[in-house]
Amino acid sequence: MYAIVKTGGKQYKATKDLIFSTELLKAEVGSTIELPVLLYADDKTVLTGKKAEKVTVTAKVLEHGKGAKLTIFTYKAKKNVRKKQGHRQPYTKLKIENITVGKE
């Protein structure tokens, strides 16, 4: 059984006990959040659209952090133009706790 959930502008295939990182969310560490479901599938059924909205996926916020540092260096040859810039993408680590299907 799995569900396709949308968070942080991206879609993730969520199964029970899956731990993954997503864009930074405004949630406390240790709190539980509910993710919007786009598709649900198990051995017998596939739910999409309005029927998939009856499925609830709950996830626990494990931590917030920053990713690995990226170094961006741009220059223009023969113009003495150089620019060095760094970036660390903030993220939220989530653990899928439960996938439940409501009444249809």
Image (cartoon, helix red, strand yellow):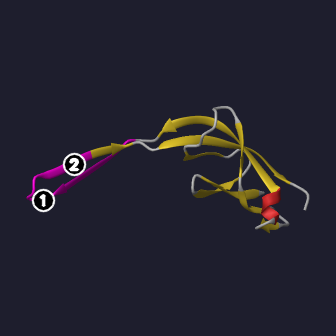
Quarter of the image where the N terminus is located: bottom right
Q: Is residue 78 above or below residue 26?
A: below
**Residue 66: x %, y % from top left:** 47, 38
Q: Residue placed at 59% from the left, 34% from the top?
A: 63
Residue that badge 1 annotates: 77
Quarter of the image where the C terminus is located: bottom right
* Residue kind at label 2, given as amino acid type: Lys
* Residue kind at label 1, given as amino acid type: Ala
Q: How far apart are marks 2 and 1 (CA)?
A: 12 Å
Q: In this view, does 17 lie above or below 41?
A: above
Residue at disc 2, secondary structure: strand
Q: Image check: 46 left or right of 75?
A: right
The first of marks 2 and 1 along the sequence is 1
Tell me the magenta residue range: 69-84
* Residue found at the far left of this picture: 78
Q: Main secondary structure of the magenta part?
A: strand
**Residue 32: x %, y % from top left:** 72, 38
Q: Is residue 42 above or below residue 18?
A: below
The numbered dot on residue 44 is none
Q: Image check: 7 left or right of 40?
A: left
**Residue 90: x %, y % from top left:** 49, 41
Q: Residue placed at 55% from the left, 36% from the top?
A: 64
Does the magenta run of residues contain 10?
A: no
Q: Residues within 10 Å of mark 1 (few under 14, many from 20)?
A: few
Residue that badge 2 annotates: 83
